[in-house]
Structures are given as structure tokens and as C-alpha cells.
Image: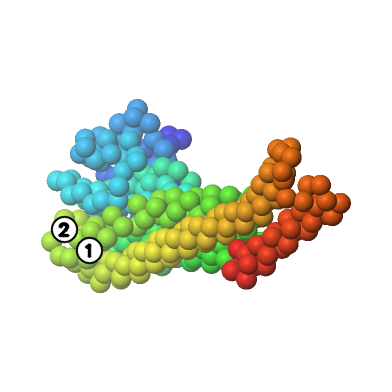
Amino acid sequence: MPRVIVDCALYRDGRRVEVSGDVSTALAEAREGEGGFLWLGVHDPTQREFDRLSEDFALHPLAVEDALRAHQRPKLETYEDALFLVLKPVLYEEESGTVTTGELMVFVGHCFVLTVRHGEANPLGVVRERLERERHVLAHGPTAVMYAVSDAVVDQYMEVAGELQVDLEELEADVFDPRGQDPRRARMTASRIYAFKRQVLEFRRATSPLTEPMDRLARAGLSFVDDRSRPFFRDVSDHLTRANEQVEALDRLLSDVLNAYLAQMGVRQNDDMRKISAWAAMVAVPTALAGVYGMNFDYMPETHQVWGYPAVLVLMAGICLGLYRMFKRRDWL
């Protein structure tokens, strides 16, 4: 079996049957009789590795190109010989607090399911194990696999949205923390807000475009989709709607936090400018008086009196004290 193939199994009436020959032989066996289908899992295939598989399953060239190129938006395409679904599973890295997206393509055709995944975000192993325990679900054929994979991906969305909500609450607490007045801490908070904004945007790119494919799967009339599966896809669509609502709420709350932070920074800057202006005004008074008396004119007030020098100092101190009290009453200092 080629290294690119992660798992390959033949299922009959919900029971796994090991494959002894190559993929083409296993597919032929799946199409013999009723109640059987082949589930083949592939990870990061190259063009050369995928060419043989695409020939065995008679996949459309455009779908093959999308499956190899990756970086696709979630979508659902219908072709003559297969149904092609693109999903973007997400993975939350707790240590770094970042969201990583992968890509998962699902081909469903006559008696086969072909899954192609890119990246590390991968629910397929867990899905296959669960389905093999739930034989009554697996007995419904390839449609059951597509439903289970879609359901697992959307459940991941809900979990990741919950983790991001916790992170956002911590970020919000930091924004309104009095210690945030420290310039270094303020710069770190700003960087965290913009980094979090990028995470939510990346998350939204995975969840939002999937709404239309799930709605189509929940409706009748699609080839290779059992009509009995429509209520299950409807349930996935409902979960996806809740996930999208959570993402929208995260985005709105994050925008509010950002606006509050910017307003807070503006107020602090105004306070700083008022303090600087107040101190500058107090410094300007003695500077002006000293500058006048430093011009060495003969006819200056009290210059020839013994008490003239301390009188000028007292005058400077009195004016500065008066300014200080005035600025203090107005909360400038």
C-alpha cells in the first residue's frame, strides 16, 4: 500500500473487512453485491501519488486539482461520478493560544468514500473508530461517513469557539487592568488584541463558507446522498449556525474591546499632555522672571535693595504654588 494512504478498509453491513489487494481490487469487491463500500484515507498526496487513485475512482480533473492544491474555501461540488466536499477542520493550540486550520476533502461516489487531508487538524481517526463501533450508522454507506466527518469538524468549531471565548475574557480583563498604564504592558496588550483579531478572522474563514454546503446537503436532490440522511445534515447545519453565531459574537466583542482600549489610550494620552502642560506652565513662570532680572538693567524693581533677591524668589514660589493648586483642582496633576 502506498505511503500516502493512511487507511484503507472495505465495509459490508457496517463491519470492517480488511483489504488484501490493491485499491482497484478493493473497489471492485466493494461494488460486488450490496451493502458494501470502500473508505480510503489519504494524507498530503503529491500529483504523482494521486494520479493512480484518481484513475481508479474516476474523479473529475477539476476536483483532483482542488484536492491537490489545497487552500480551498469550504464548498460542495457535484460531478457526474462523485460528490466533492471541502471542509476546514481547526485545531486550538493551548500553549500558544492560536488556531490552526487544515483542509479536508471528501469524495463520495458509487460504493466509495475518499478522504484527502492536508495539515495536522485531523478528526478522521476518531471518526473512523467511532463509526466502526456504531455499525448501525456505518451500514448506511458513504453518506454516513460524510455526515460523521462533517459533524466532527463542526463539533471542533464549537470547542474552539469556547476556548477562544475564555481567551477573550482574559484579554478583556487585561485591557481594563490598572497595571495596563505601564507603556510596555500597553504595547503588549495592543499586540495581543491584533493577534487575537487575526485568529478570529482565520476561524471565520473556516466556519462561515460551510453554511451553504451544509444547507444543500440537508435538502433533497443531491446525487450519492441518501435522502434518509437529510435530518442528520440538518442537525449539523444547526450546530454550524451556533458556531457561526459564536464567531460573530467573538468578533463583535473583540471590536468593542479594541475600541475601548483605543479610547482608554486616548484618555491616558490626554491626561499625560495635561500634566506636561501644567508642569511646563509652572516652569515657565520662574524662567520668565529670572530671564527679566538677568538682563542687567540699572533701573530694575528692587535690584538695589537687600531684600530684593529673596522677594523675587518668594514671588516665583508663590506664583508656582498658585498654579499648582489651580491645576490640582482641575485634575490636571
Residue 299 percent across, percent down from the top left: 72, 43
Measure how far apart labels 1 and 2 are at the Cα level.
Answer: 11 Å
Name which residue lies at 16% across and 58% down. Answer: 222
Which quadrant of the view contains residue 320? bottom right
Judge depth for marks 1 and 2 and give the one in front: 1
Decide which of 303, 271 is in the foreground and name it.
303
Left or right? Give the position of 164 relative to 140: right
Residue 108, percent across and down? Answer: 26, 51
**Three-letter code, disc 1:** Asp
Instruction: Please name the residue shown 33% across and 47% down the image.
Output: 105
The circle on residue 222 is 2
Determine which quarter of the picture holds residue 243: bottom left
Q: Taking 33 as reference, is 134 above or below it?
A: below
Query: Which class describes the residues within 10 Å of circle 2: few (<14), some (14-19), or many (20+)?
Result: few
* Along the viewing direction, whichever of 95 and 59 lies nearer the viewer: 95
Q: Secondary structure at mark 1?
A: helix
Q: Quadrant of residue 26?
A: top left
Residue 229 point in image, percent of width and height:
25, 67
Q: Which labelled disc corresponds to residue 282?
A: none
Q: Label 2: state its secondary structure.
A: loop
Q: Which mark is residue 215?
A: 1
Can residue 32 be seen here? The reply is no
Kindly identify the amino acid type of the residue bearing the numbered disc 2. Answer: Leu
- The residue sitting at the front extreme is 299
